[in-house]
Amino acid sequence: MSGFDGTRYQARFDELARQGVDVHGEAALVRSFEPGSVLDAGCGTGRVAIERA
């Protein structure tokens, strides 16, 4: 099993975004609940937290 490659992981989402895919669905869902704060548990590259901010 190979290790996690964060650069490759992020590149996948960058390519999907270039293709017009909505890669911020999680942030939109959270936003719809109008929370006062959100805990990002440190999963992935932070793309959801960045969009939420």
Image (spheres, grey):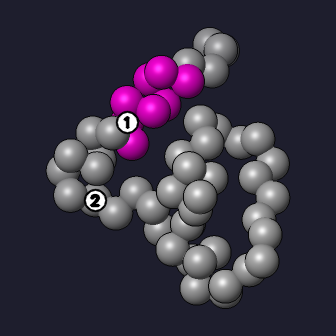
The answer to which of 34 and 25 lies nearer the viewer is 34
- In the picture, residue 43 is in which quadrant? top right
Circle 2: is it few (<14), some (14-19), or many (20+) Cα within 10 Å?
Answer: few
Residue 36 to residue 15: above or below = below
Q: Residue shown at 18%/50% (left/top)? A: 19
Say which residue label 1 marks.
Answer: 12
Q: Secondary structure at mark 2?
A: loop
Q: Residue shown at 58%/85% (left/top)? A: 32
Magenta-tinted stretch? 6-13
Q: Is residue 10 magenta?
A: yes
Residue 41 in view, yes or no: yes
Q: What's the residue type where badge 2 is placed?
A: Val
The tag earlier along the polypeptide, 1 or 2, is 1
Q: Are marks 1 and 2 in contact (CB under 8 Å)?
A: no
Q: Which residue is outermost to the top?
A: 2
Say which residue label 2 marks.
Answer: 21
Judged left or right of residue 50, residue 3 is: right
Residue 46 to residue 36: above or below = above
The x and y percentages for residue 30 are 63, 75
Q: Is residue 28 magenta?
A: no
